């Protein structure tokens, strides 16, 4: 079955090669870190220190991992931490977030046995922590063969993912049994991974570490900088459209225009932060044709920055710093049927939050917010209906400061009430992170052998 999986992976990459080349030439995707993706990772000078390999997929998992990484290094100061990501944006954020903390930040290897073996040989981890649900069969199998302990942390398994895994139940069972521990966000997630074949003694509900992600000093300084440049604390309310996908940018722009036509109040400003950098120019084109005055974060400072109708946040990792200036935050990916994005970051600063209907990526989190009336979730709507409804909801919220503030405080309370998952996670990880001298010696022996082998083949 592993051979068939590897064959299908190879065929899939070959079939998608034209798209990869297009994205590489136009957006610079997939080119970055190609050697690392093939397992050519830097050797670590950590002979006497066990290495924790923390794997995050993209921006969301990377930012969520910050409190967990901090707690790990405080609890296990003799360990070294390395971080991997899959996406280009995740890599950029990881290099910023873990600067000074991680011994190395690199791209996760392609899931072929030979590239995984090369990567594991270079890093020689004592254990691997996988954020959320990244079940790479060959990677997990090779970790098991080398005696590297693997834990799924902040584990999440949506109903859609669960249904897909059930189609290959026997193979999935072999994959999940490579996990030494699965620390899941909710009981529903735990039930699903048990149903896929992981024994109950390896499954624990630990909560969601995303509730612990705080705003650091650097973000406070950046928040002040952005606020001063764009006059975000001015008289005009600010609506932030966060992590948007098509057609959400168009919906937001048209809703703002509709509000300007029907309201006599001070017109709101709109800040749009597309989820993916390759869509920055597409969003810029929409703003160009909108009739609104606008500017981009990446443009040189200009006097128009303080008075324009709309701002395009065409940068990576700066969205969190904007939330404290927002009057209303629309969290994207929720009208575009991608499953939604993180509502916790705006909630933490007490923002008034609106989402679309499609939030399956955050079902458990959304339940907390909906039960306490801490945000507004719109029904499933067509694009034309969404423009009208968003304009109506925004206008009502802008005219009712008491309701906005109350919703924001309830959202903040939800975050505060659910903090603590990072510390619980570290305590639960202690048995697999506290290696015996014999285990440390075995890992070092494996690493020395692999390094000699790689040096000879280089």
Image: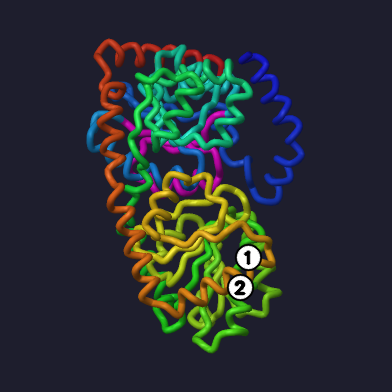
Could you say whether the residue bearing mark 1 is in a helix, strand or loop?
helix
Q: Position of residue 41 (x, y in %)?
A: 49, 29
Please indicate whether residue 322 sits to the left or right of residue 271 in the image. Answer: left
Q: Is residue 265 above or below residue 342?
A: below
Q: Is residue 92 left or right of residue 429?
A: right
Is 389 magenta? The answer is no
Q: Nearer the viewer, residue 7 or 44?
A: 7
Mark 2 residue element = helix
Number of labels in the image equals: 2
Dot 1 crowding, Cα within 10 Å, few <14, some 14–19, many 20+: many
List the residue tagged with mark 2: 255
Residue 265: horizontal and vertical position, in percent?
50, 87
Q: Is residue 329 above or below residue 28?
A: below
Q: Is residue 221 visible to us here?
A: no
Report x, y in % for residue 14.
74, 30
Residue 141 place in picture, x, y as percent: 51, 16
Which residue occupies the extreme front position in the image?
A: 371
Residue 307 shows up from this direction: yes
Whichever of labels 1 and 2 marks the residue nearer the N terminus, that label is 2
Residue range corresponding to the magenta coloring: 80-109
Q: Nearer the viewer, residue 94 or 198?
A: 198
Q: Nearer the viewer, residue 374 or 316?
A: 374
- Height in image: 121 above or below 87? above
In the picture of the structure, the residue carrying the numbered disc 1 is 386
Q: Are marks 1 and 2 in contact (CB under 8 Å)?
A: yes
Q: Residues within 10 Å of mark 2 (few under 14, many from 20)?
A: many
Q: Residue at x 38, y 46 (%)?
A: 210
Q: In the rendered image, which quarter contains the N terminus?
A: top right
Whole-angstrom CA distance, mark 1 to mark 2, is: 8 Å
């Amino acid at each position: 079955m592993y051979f068939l999986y590897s064959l299908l992976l190879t065929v899939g990459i070959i079939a998608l090669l034209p798209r990869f080349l297009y994205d590489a030439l136009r957006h610079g995707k997939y080119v970055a870190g190609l050697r690392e993706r093939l397992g050519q990772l830097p050797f670590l000078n950590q002979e006497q220190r066990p290495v924790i390999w923390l794997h995050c997929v993209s921006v969301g998992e990377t930012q969520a991992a910050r409190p967990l990484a901090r707690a790990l290094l405080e609890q296990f100061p003799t360990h070294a931490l390395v971080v991997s990501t899959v996406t280009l944006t995740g890599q950029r954020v990881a290099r910023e977030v873990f600067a000074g903390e991680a011994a190395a930040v690199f791209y996760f290897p392609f899931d072929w046995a030979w590239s995984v073996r090369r990567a594991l040989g270079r890093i020689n981890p004592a254990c691997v922590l996988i954020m959320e649900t990244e079940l790479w069969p060959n990677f997990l199998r090779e970790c098991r063969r080398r005696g590297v302990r693997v834990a799924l942390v902040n584990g999440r398994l949506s109903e859609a993912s669960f249904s897909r895994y059930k189609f290959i139940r026997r193979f999935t069972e072999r994959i999940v049994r490579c996990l030494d521990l699965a620390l899941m966000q909710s009981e529903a997630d735990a039930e699903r991974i048990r149903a896929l074949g992981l024994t109950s003694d390896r499954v624990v509900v630990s909560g969601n570490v995303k509730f612990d992600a705080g705003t650091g000093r650097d973000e406070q300084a950046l928040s002040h900088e952005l606020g001063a440049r764009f006059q975000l604390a001015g008289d005009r309310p600010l609506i932030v459209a966060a992590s948007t996908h098509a057609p959400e940018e168009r919906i937001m722009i048209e809703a703002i225009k509709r509000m300007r036509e029907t309201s006599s109040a001070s017109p709101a400003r709109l800040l749009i932060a597309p989820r993916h950098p390759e869509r920055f120019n597409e969003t810029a084109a929409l703003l160009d044709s909108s009739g609104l005055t606008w500017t981009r974060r990446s443009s040189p400072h200009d006097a128009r920055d303080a008075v324009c109708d709309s701002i395009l946040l065409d940068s990576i990792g700066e969205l969190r710093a904007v939330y404290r200036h927002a009057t209303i935050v629309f969290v994207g990916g929720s009208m575009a049927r991608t499953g939604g994005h993180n509502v916790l970051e705006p909630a933490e600063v007490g923002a008034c939050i609106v989402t679309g209907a499609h939030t399956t990526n955050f079902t458990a989190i959304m339940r907390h917010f909906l039960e306490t009336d801490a945000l507004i979730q719109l029904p499933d709507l067509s694009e034309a209906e969404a423009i009208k409804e968003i304009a109506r909801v925004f206008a009502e919220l802008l005219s009712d400061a008491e309701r906005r503030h109350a919703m924001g405080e309830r959202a903040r309370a939800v975050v505060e009430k659910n903090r603590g998952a990072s510390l619980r996670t570290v305590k639960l990880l202690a048995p697999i992170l506290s290696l015996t001298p014999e285990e440390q010696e075995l890992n070092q022996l494996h690493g020395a052998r692999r390094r000699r082998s790689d040096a000879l083949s280089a």
